Amino acid sequence: LAIQQKAREEKEHKRGRLDARHNYLLRTVAEHLQVPQAEIEDTILEGFQIELMDQFFLRPSVTLLMFCAPKVEPAEVVTSTTTTATTTAAPAPAAKPAKARVKV
């Protein structure tokens, strides 16, 4: 329980460090992958990726920033005579990560 609380506090501390540059990149990646920006942001804040982004912004020798995400299969549309339902896309099993290249 204490470990989870510490992880939440660390995540919120990192969230406070995000600025317009981070938000621009996160928004661009989210649009490219067609997922909510909050989902991308949460993923970035869980590990040490924010530090990699900071290095990208600060060090001229770092010229590439790569984002990877699981590849998702298109949603299947189920139709009946009375109703129409659309399922959401789920991650494909054992799929290779999709790479998002973002030019800034």
Image (cartoon, grey):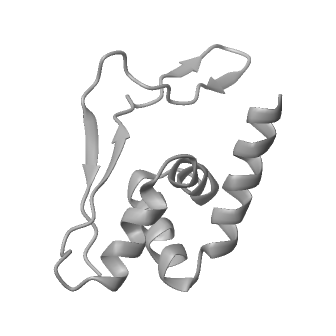
In the depicted structure, whether residue 51 falls above or below residue 84 = below
Left or right? Give the position of 93 relative to 21: left
Q: Position of residue 101 (x, y in %)?
A: 24, 62
In the depicted structure, whether residue 99 falls above or below residue 61 = above
Q: Quadrant of the N terminus?
A: top right
Residue ID at (39%, 69%):
53
Left or right? Give the position of 101 relative to 38: left
Q: 47 or 82: nearer the eye?
A: 47
Residue ID at (56%, 18%):
78
Give the farthest residue toward the front. 2
Q: 33 or 99: nearer the eye?
A: 99
Among the 4 quarters of the image, the one containing residue 69: top left
In the depicted structure, whether residue 30 falls above or below residue 80 = below
Q: 99 or 82: nearer the eye?
A: 99
State the count of labels: 0
Among the 4 quarters of the image, the one containing residue 82: top right
In the depicted structure, whether residue 22 falls above or below residue 15 = below
Q: Quadrant of the C terminus?
A: bottom left
Residue ID at (27%, 58%):
66
Residue ID at (49%, 66%):
26
Q: Position of residue 70 (x, y in %)?
A: 37, 34
Q: Position of residue 94 (x, y in %)?
A: 30, 17
Left or right? Give the position of 21 relative to 88: left
Left or right? Give the position of 38 relative to 82: left
